[in-house]
Image (cartoon, rainbow, N blue to C red):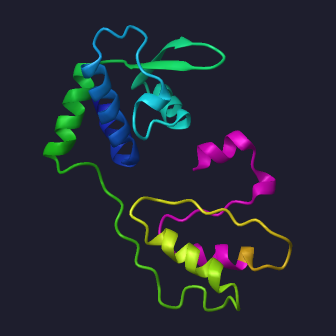
Amino acid sequence: MEARIVEFLEKNPKYVEVIKNALEYEQANPDDEFGFVWSDIVGGNPARLNKLVTEGVLRITYRTRTSCHYKLVDQEATRRVLRLLEDKGGPIIEEKIEVPKDMFDIVIGHEDVKRVVLKSLNAEKPVHVMFVGPPATAKTLMMTELMRLPNSRYCLGSTMSKAGTIDYL
């Protein structure tokens, strides 16, 4: 189980903080038989927690129409994995993005949108951007420019379901 968690966290470093926060919550609240809800831990949005359930890191202890409670499957194994990752220097952290100087040069106008997108690219934490608007407003042109960056993804909303978009992000 530990090897699988290590492999998952090395591929998905954004989940390390969620798992650390879950472990801290469980250690601070050992008598809480139901566990935590998504709002109890920082970074624990329901989509991420459900992904951790499918990976076998968390289990659902109690579910109603309005809430879902989670607990770590194995606290000790999780603690060992986090310690191992710290000893190795942590999971692979995404590098700072080097934005080419000619990014968006082919887009004429839309200076305010370009400025917002460039700020999101240089943000400390990842920021997702969704382009919405009428036809012929340079949405596709800007997205194809963004495809020049490493690890960028391009998807058309008309081809995605609501659940599929969350999985994609």
Residue 164 horizontal/vertical position (percent): 68, 43
Q: Residue at x 43, y 72 (%)?
A: 122
Which of the 4 image quadrants contains residue 34? top left
On screen, residue 110 versus residue 52, left or right, reads right
Above or below for 133 versus 109: above
Above or below for 40 versus 124: above
Q: Is residue 148 visible?
A: no
On screen, residue 9 versus residue 116, left or right, reads left
Q: Residue at x 70, y 66 (%)?
A: 131
Residue 11 horizontal/vertical position (percent): 39, 47
Q: Does the magenta segment cover residue 5?
A: no
Which of the 4 image quadrants contains residue 16? top left
Residue 43 horizontal/vertical position (percent): 43, 41
Q: Does the magenta segment cover residue 142?
A: yes
Of residues 133 and 97, the one nearer the viewer is 133
The outermost residue toward the left is: 87
On screen, residue 26 versus residue 36, left or right, reads left
Above or below for 99 versus 125: below
Start-end of magenta stretch: 141-169
Which of the 4 image quadrants contains residue 6? top left
The N terminus is located in which quarter? top left
Q: Is residue 165 visible?
A: yes
Q: Residue at x 36, y 60 (%)?
A: 94
Q: Residue at x 27, y 28 (%)?
A: 24
Q: How many marks?
A: 0
Residue 152 horizontal/vertical position (percent): 54, 65
